[in-house]
Image (tube, grey):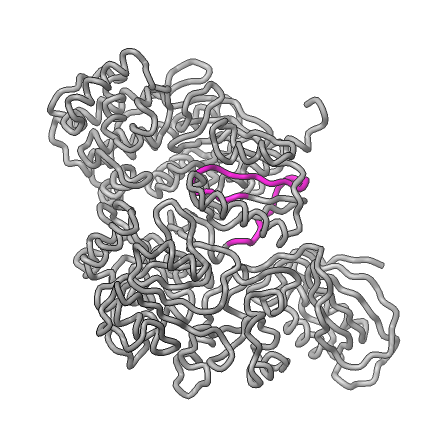
Amino acid sequence: MSNRAPIRAASRAGSVSRAGAASAGPLAGRRVRVRGVVQGVGFRPFVYGLASELDLAGQVSNDGDGVLVEVQGEPVDVEAFCRRVRDDAPPLSAVEDVGWTDLPVRPLTGFTIAASGPGGGRTLVPPDVATCARCLAEFTDPSDRRYRHPFITCTACGPRFTIVTGLPYDRPRTTMASFPMCARCRAEYTDPSDRRFHAQPVSCHDCGPVLRLTVPETTVPEATVPEAPSRWREDALAGARALLADGRIVAVKGLGGYHLACDATDPVAVARLRERKRRGDKPFALLVADLDAARAIAHVDDVEAALLTSTRRPIVLVRRRAGTDVAPEVAPGNAELGVMLPPTALHHLLLGLPGDPPGPRVLVLTSGNLAGQPIVTDDDEAVRRLGGIADAWLGHDRAIHVPCDDSVVTVVDRAELPIRRSRGYAPLPVSLPVEAPPLLAVGGDLKNTFCLAQGRYAWLSAHVGDLGDLATARAFDLATRHLRELVSVTPAVVVHDRHPGYRGTRWAQGSGLPTIAVQHHHAHLAAVMAEHGLPPGTQVIGLALDGTGYGDDGAVWGGELLIADYTGFRRWAHLAYVPLPGGDAAVRRPYRMALAHLDAAGVPWDDDLPPVVACPDAERRVLARQLVAGIACVPTSSAGRLFDAVASLAGIRHEVGYEAQAAIELQSLAGPVIRSGADGVAHDLPLSESGDPRTWDVGVLVRAVAADVRAGVPVEVTAARFHRGLAAGLVAAARLAAVETGLRHVALSGGVFCNGLLVSLVAQGVRESGLEVLRHGRVPPGDGGLALGQAVVGASRLARPHGE
């Protein structure tokens, strides 16, 4: 007989046989299969304890398909075991399925953890987990043998995804394989009553990885740190902290790669790091010791606090406090700071424990790479690639098998909004609303993540980066190969963006496998639909707003209202086309986009408007001829470029050093005005009364912004009016589309919806219209979530009966 545990949690009540009591009747035996995130989370020790409590004999083991248990005992206790193996599972686990078959009763005594079986099936590897409270208590206790151990871990915390080299998950299949356990660690590892029972990364000062500080003598004066250029253990840590206190930049080996660290209160150090990393004005993330330290530099509410202290330890975007000693150079022009708490014991040590010499209380902690390149994981490569940035390297001898950058989230209306999904989240799967054949979705070229899918699950990769860089393209190849092996998916088809020039498109077409092309904004909307589990055939009113997406008519789309399901879409409305003069030049120099919008709106380029002054005379003359002749002026409906244009028109930002800089600064100025309720004006964004598709008349909004500038309206008020007007125009169109189509779901996706202010305004308007809003909560609205949408569209098209 084969059975499944009920999906709904069953009652935990029931008769439990006493250990050693004589059987009142015939015994029962079962082979129990548990699937899901059940390796690397203390599941076998949990099963051991549960079986012992219920006085069951048998064994438990890992294999390539999850956890396999054989139990034998009183029928009521065997039944209770099959219920409780799901209901009482360890907190880090995620039980997907429990099934069993009956076994003949055999002479058995006791319960054991058996050697792992062969791989080849599929199980779900957990993400890396921040150091737990119990480990931190030992780590800070001078009487504990793991006091100040940088790599302290147990079954409830520590590295998982970044160290696993194969399945099933056992120490020999991790990068801890080269660290034999000492006698005391081995005793804990084999003791069923110990919380390190079968904790694969377990180690201590005697047998674990060792810190090493490398300081090129030509870079840092020898007097700055003790003795030689290479130091181990406490000397390495003390040297690194001394360097940070002296304003130096230290490359620090974390869970998923190297970070670059410096004192966040030292403007010279921060400026030096920014220059060396070629980061422009892009904000840096900050590392602080605890919530009190986070609240000293930023406004942190209870939802943000829960995210900061969660086991995932993401970077959380929070509103910065005025008057703190954090250097303005950390996040110029930005009202928010990206803050994280220590994900590992090593990061706690960097900030210092009680009794340590004084050091920086707030550290910049940014990815160890040059702008646009993948994060560095290899020690030798770190010295080579970061040699022009770092003054020293604090590394260790445990290898990182899988690169995994930090995750970034924000909170909008008390709900999490992912900006980058990586460490702490990857490689946990997302449930699919359709059955998928084995496929690979390659995602977009910017902020790339890819996705493997089969059955009802999709596995999104960690953040890869921008595929335009050769090193990132190589990282993409390695990451796809590793994730294929880890989840046992061999793709039979590759899904890609419809843009013919994307590197991901060329990669797919060169793969030798059948391919499916998916329009960019359709993929965005399918991703948020899949997140919410909408069944096949369901249509939504989709607002897809971003910077760039290849349109079916060859234009650059990016301000779209689509009527969409998983298999296709109809373009119901879009922002009116304006020329994109010079392509990428208009992206880098928002004043060009502002001048194009002014021209399209019929507003003369007079010298009282900021973008006219910002554009050099010679360039302005060439641009005018370009717009008249239509040379290198592909039409665009991009909402991202509209934000750029308004930021320049309002005099906020005329050139950008990183993606969405102008939009972020526009949002930063608008936020306080909107939160305060001051000046309730919303600039109009009317929708055409007819047309297929309809168009929003962006010229009306642009003329209103220009009038504000000429009237001397404060720039923050103009920014707020623009946000309110754009949101109102989007909501009004969605409401009209709902009347025409009878649809009730309004989906929000695309990179512009990383703007929490706009998300909140649009969501509020949609709800007040009596419609249901679908927004992202598990994958990013930007291109970091694109691959999920590609995967579900590809699977849905393949599932259609032939000829549909």
Q: Position of residue 124 (x, y in %)?
A: 62, 57
The residue at the far top in this view is: 629
Residue appearing at x 20%, y 29% in the figure = 649
Q: Nearer the viewer, residue 502 or 705?
A: 502
Q: Is residue 596 above or below residue 285?
A: above
Residue appearing at x 45%, y 81% in the figure = 146
Question: Does residue 655 appear in this view?
Answer: yes
Is 445 inside the magenta-drawn segment? Answer: yes
Is 363 inside the magenta-drawn segment? Answer: no
Horizontally, residue 724 falls left or right of residue 126, namely left
Horizontally, residue 580 falls left or right of residue 381, namely left
Horizontally, residue 235 falls left or right of residue 73, namely left
**Range drawn in magenta:** 426-450
Q: Position of residue 105 (x, y in %)?
A: 87, 73
Residue appearing at x 47%, y 21% in the figure = 572
Q: Is residue 740 above or below residue 288?
A: above
Question: Does residue 435 appear in this view?
Answer: no
Q: Position of residue 546 (x, y in %)?
A: 39, 33
Q: Quadrant of residue 591?
A: top left
Residue appearing at x 37%, y 19% in the figure = 635
Q: Nearer the viewer, residue 477 or 50?
A: 477
Q: Position of residue 731 (x, y in %)?
A: 39, 30
Q: Nearer the viewer, residue 86 or 59?
A: 59
